Image (cartoon, grey):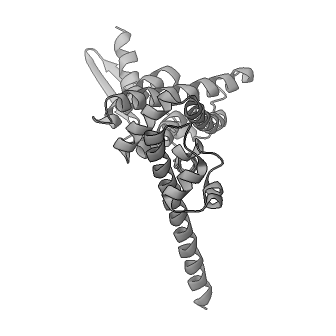
Amino acid sequence: MPEPAKNSRTTASRANGAATQRLKVRRELAAAAMELFATKGYEATTVDEIAATAGVARRTFFRHFRSKEEAIFPDHDDTLVRAQAVLEAAPPHENPLDTVCRGIKEVMKMYAASPKGSVERYKLTREVPALREREIASVARYERLFTRYLLGHFDEEAHRDGDDDPLLAEVAASAVVTAHNHVLRRWLRGGGVGDVEAQLDHAFAIVRRTFGTGFGANRPASEQPTASVRRTDEVLVTVARTDAPLGEIMATIEQALAGD
């Protein structure tokens, strides 16, 4: 009887090993491309040279990348999968905009994992239009993923006009991505040093204050409020869930204080 479980573990182990090897080769090809672009220049570098520098055959290169500019961004496909996994595993009480903010943090983790390489890549994309276009295409994939997610999480009572839903979802998703990219570029221009996570959280708080309402159609009604305020003379009492986003709690308090 235990044989099927053993076979399942073996299959999973082989799959994980293959995925690890695939990522290893992709990163070696990316490192070779970066090295050649820096020494020979982007236009003068060929796919054959990249493959030879990485110690693989030309056909191996094309099993991993469709072009030499694509080799500069080896981790975006896997990062997109991780971002989608964050959305799919989101707890039902979480504000969908907070979920999206957590999802795009996977992108920041990708860059922060190798600050030096990320800074070099950033400088190169500023110099080569083809690489810049590839980067823009990658950003668009994240925006589409987040737009689809937000579009499925509208509060019908807050947005009775269905024609506005796609617009708000797209604008909110774009705001999250723009906030992330603003912080990322500033961090890269600064040499990849500093507390980039704190900077990112500050930027997300601004996005939440601006676009954080109207989402949550799939959350139970009893779990939708994250914070409430009660005033008694000069005393302000706030009640909030322990897992409530700080940005929403602060926004609720600010609204109550503004009522003076």
Q: Is residue 221 above or below residue 25?
A: above
Question: Residue 102 appears at what percent x and percent y?
Answer: 46, 41
Q: Nearer the viewer, residue 60 or 227?
A: 60
Question: Where is residue 123 drawn, in percent x and y?
Answer: 42, 32
> What is the residue that sits farthest to the right in this orientation?
163
Q: Is residue 94 left or right of residue 247?
A: right
Q: Camera-side residue: 140 or 225?
A: 140
Residue drawn at (50%, 26%), measured in percent from left and top? 178
Which residue is at 56% across, 68% downward? 18
The image quadrant where one finds the N terminus is: bottom right
Q: Nearer the viewer, residue 83 or 140?
A: 140
Query: Where is residue 191 shown, x and y percent of the image?
Result: 31, 33
Asked where in the image residue 259 lies, by quadrant, the reply is top left
Question: Please, which residue is most extreme toward the top here?
Answer: 260
Regarding residue 92, the answer to whether it shows in the image is no
**Residue for point 46% across, 31% down:** 180
Give the x, y percent position of residue 50.
Answer: 54, 52
